[in-house]
């Protein structure tokens, strides 16, 4: 990208021209996860292609919209679809929207994703709070970024905010959804893993695997944004009983879990009033 500070300023200036509400909470909706949008009283919506310096999502099941509005009394900005390193974008491009959200005013960030279940106790359709992560991506979103956004040597000893995790736990209980927590490992993609790779990922401590979220969490921590994340388990990665993955089935499983996750995020946002 061009000079990051200049790009962030140009994009935020463009958005502020539209007299938008100042968002308190940011939300990133992952693969097949859109139901929360129905709970937002929308003030304004922008296609990513309308926004200066925003990449365009190339994933067909991502809507590619930045939505401003309210849930209850809480002002939010939501990404309906994210960017991925595997699409060919740099890590700075992948995480650019998080920097924009911070400049617009968010203090909290909720993220969601679709993930493969490595833990044998995780089944298709389960919702899992990410308790910690393992980063196996080949680049960092902080590489080449100076201290103008915060300490480039960002501390990651507690990447997921404990208070937000408590609010998520309470939202799980309110919706009678069984609470599960796990370690998320991020890989580059877009190819899926071999049986040997699934065994290795499980052996190093991962409970689920995906191709997103971690770069956004790293940037959120650099910027001082409290964040939390939930994975939808869309396929079971048992190396001894592995079947070819059907992407359409993954989207279907995510869609079926979407309403539960939407209610959990809704209740979590409301708790931040």
Image (cartoon, grey):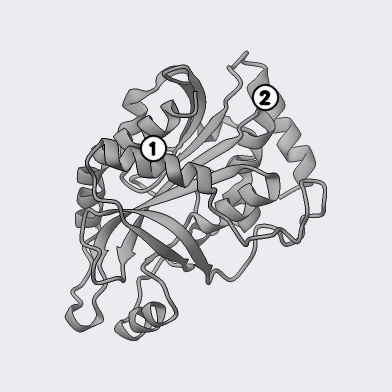
The CA distance from mark 1 to mark 2 is 21 Å
Q: Is mark 1 on a helix, strand or loop?
A: loop
- Locate residue 164, reporting x and y percent: 49, 42
Residue at 56% in and 52% down: 217
Q: Nearer the viewer, residue 111 or 60?
A: 111
Is 170 drawn above or below residue 215 in the view shown? above
Vertical placement of 79 versus 123: above or below? above
**Which residue is disc 2 drawn over?**
14
97 displayed left or right of 150: left
N-terminal label among 1 and 2: 2
Q: Where is residue 213 in the image (x, y as percent from the top left)?
A: 49, 54
The residue lying toward the viewer, choosing from 252 and 150, is 150
| Circles 1 and 2: CB atoms closer than 8 Å | no
Q: Report the side of 240 relative to 60 (left or right).
A: left
- The structure residue drawn at horizontal position 23% and vertical position 76%, both measured from the top left corner, is 238
| Residue drawn at the location 66% of the way across and 41% of the way down | 99
Whole-percent x and y of residue 258? Answer: 27, 41
Residue 34 visible from this viewpoint: no
Give the number of the disc on residue 63: 1
Q: Quick one: which residue is furthest to the top in this view? A: 19
Q: Quadrant of residue 191?
A: bottom left
């Amino acid at each position: 990208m061009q000079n990051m500070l200049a790009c962030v300023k140009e994009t935020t200036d463009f958005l502020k021209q539209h007299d938008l509400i100042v968002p308190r909470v940011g939300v990133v909706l992952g693969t097949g996860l859109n139901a929360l949008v129905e709970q937002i009283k929308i003030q304004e919506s922008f296609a990513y292609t309308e926004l200066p310096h925003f990449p365009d999502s190339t994933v067909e099941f991502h809507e590619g919209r930045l939505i401003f509005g309210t849930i209850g009394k809480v002002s939010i900005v939501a990404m309906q679809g994210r960017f991925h390193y595997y699409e060919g974008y740099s890590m700075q491009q992948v995480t650019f929207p998080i920097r924009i959200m911070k400049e617009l005013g968010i203090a909290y960030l909720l993220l969601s994703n679709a993930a493969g279940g490595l833990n044998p106790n995780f089944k298709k359709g389960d919702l899992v709070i990410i308790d910690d992560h393992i980063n196996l991506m080949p680049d960092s979103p902080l590489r080449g970024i100076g201290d103008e956004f915060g300490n480039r040597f960002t501390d990651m000893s507690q990447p997921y905010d404990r208070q937000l995790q408590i609010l998520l736990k309470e939202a799980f209980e309110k919706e009678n959804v069984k609470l599960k927590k796990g370690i998320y490992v991020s890989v580059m993609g877009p190819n899926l893993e071999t049986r040997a790779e699934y065994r290795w990922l499980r052996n190093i401590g991962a409970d689920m695997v995906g191709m997103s979220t971690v770069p956004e969490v790293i940037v959120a921590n650099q910027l001082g944004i409290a964040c939390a994340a939930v994975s939808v388990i869309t396929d079971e990665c048992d190396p001894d009983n592995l079947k070819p993955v059907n992407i359409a089935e993954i989207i279907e499983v995510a869609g079926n879990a979407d309403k539960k996750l939407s209610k959990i995020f809704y209740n979590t946002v409301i708790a931040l009033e």
